[in-house]
Image (spheres, rainbow, N blue to C red):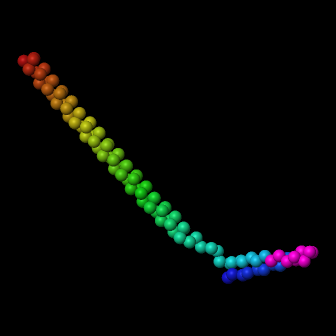
Amino acid sequence: MTEERITEIRTPEGNTHTNTTVVTDRPSSGGGGMWIGLLVLIVVGIIAVLVFSRMSDSEVAKDNAVAGAAAEVGEAAGQVGQAAEEAVDKVTE
């Protein structure tokens, strides 16, 4: 509901000043700004989830690569040890 209040003030000199005030009971709506802000917040959240999940995937891939390289080094060390034993056996024969 909207109400208009008019106030008249008369000075001793005879001048009249009128002041009009409009009072509204209904609060003003947020308009489209609230919805745009909410949409931007949702988009930023989705982007953050995607970025962090891809970072996590790259960390897992890096960890798997390091583990694979370590396994290959261990296997190579085992082959070197076996070759050394065979060389010692040939020298001692």
Quadrant including the N terminus: bottom right
Query: Residue 12: horizontal and vertical position, in percent?
Result: 92, 75
Q: Nearer the viewer, residue 57 or 76?
A: 57
Asked if 60 appears above or below 12 in the picture, the reply is above
**Residue sitting farthest toward the top:** 92
Q: Nearer the viewer, residue 11 or 63?
A: 11
Q: Quadrant of residue 81?
A: top left
47 with respect to 13 (left or right) = left
The answer to which of 93 and 19 lies nearer the viewer is 19
Q: Quadrant of the C terminus?
A: top left
Task: Tell me: 77 left or right of 14.
Answer: left
Residue 38 lies in the magenta stretch: no
Instruction: Give me the residue at 39% from left, 56% from top.
Output: 50
As drawn, 92 above or below 66: above
Quarter occupied by residue 21: bottom right
Toward the right, the furthest residue is 12
> What is the span of residues highlighted in magenta in the rendered image?
10-18
